[in-house]
Image: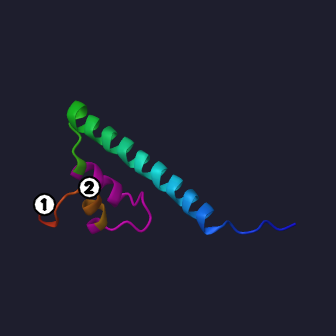
Amino acid sequence: MPKSPPTPEQRIKELEEKLRLAEQKAEFFEAVVDVMEKDYGVTEKKAARQVLTQRRVAGLTVSRAYHLLGIRHQAW
């Protein structure tokens, strides 16, 4: 018997949970980056450049990456 599609309420609940997890993951990685900067001297810009040149995130543009890091266009 085929499974019926989720109700709009169920879909909203599912998406809210995915968003909560994505926000928690982002917060965790921001904390990791902060530790790397403070304890190991790795800068966001240097690490971001390496990620971009190695094309570790499919479809991620330079502009979008620096926007996500909160680095202004003029800074790079």
In this rendering, position of residue 33 left or right of residue 16: left
Q: Tag 1's secondary structure? A: helix
Q: Which mark is residue 43?
A: none
Identify which residue is drawn at 27% across, 34% down: 35
What amino acid does circle 2 point to?
Answer: Leu
Which quadrant, please, contains the N terminus?
A: bottom right
Question: Is 56 contained in the magenta span?
Answer: yes
Residue situated in front as seen by the camera: 40 or 1: 1
Q: Give the class, few, some or many, for how many residues have Cα within 10 Å of label 1's Cα (few <14, many ≥20).
A: few
Residue situated in front as seen by the camera: 66 or 10: 10
Using the image, determine if residue 69 lies above or below residue 2: above
In this rendering, position of residue 68 left or right of residue 74: right
What amino acid does circle 1 point to?
Answer: Ala
Q: Tag 2's secondary structure? A: helix
Mark with earlier residue (1, 2): 2
Q: Residue furthest front?
A: 9
Region of the chain picked out in magenta, as a range: 45-63
Identify which residue is drawn at 46% across, 51% down: 20
Give how far across and how far down residue 46 sits, in percent.
23, 50
Q: Residue furthest left?
A: 74
Identify which residue is drawn at 13% across, 60% down: 75
In this rendering, position of residue 16 left or right of residue 23: right
Using the image, determine if residue 40 lies above or below residue 71: above
The residue pinned by badge 2 equals 69
Q: Give the class, few, some or many, for how many residues have Cα within 10 Å of label 2's Cα (few <14, many ≥20).
A: few
Give how far across and how far down residue 15 sits, in percent.
53, 60
The residue pinned by badge 1 equals 75
Name the front one of labels 1 and 2: 2
Measure the alpha-carbon separation of dots 1 and 2: 12 Å
Give how far across and how far down residue 50 sits, in percent.
31, 53
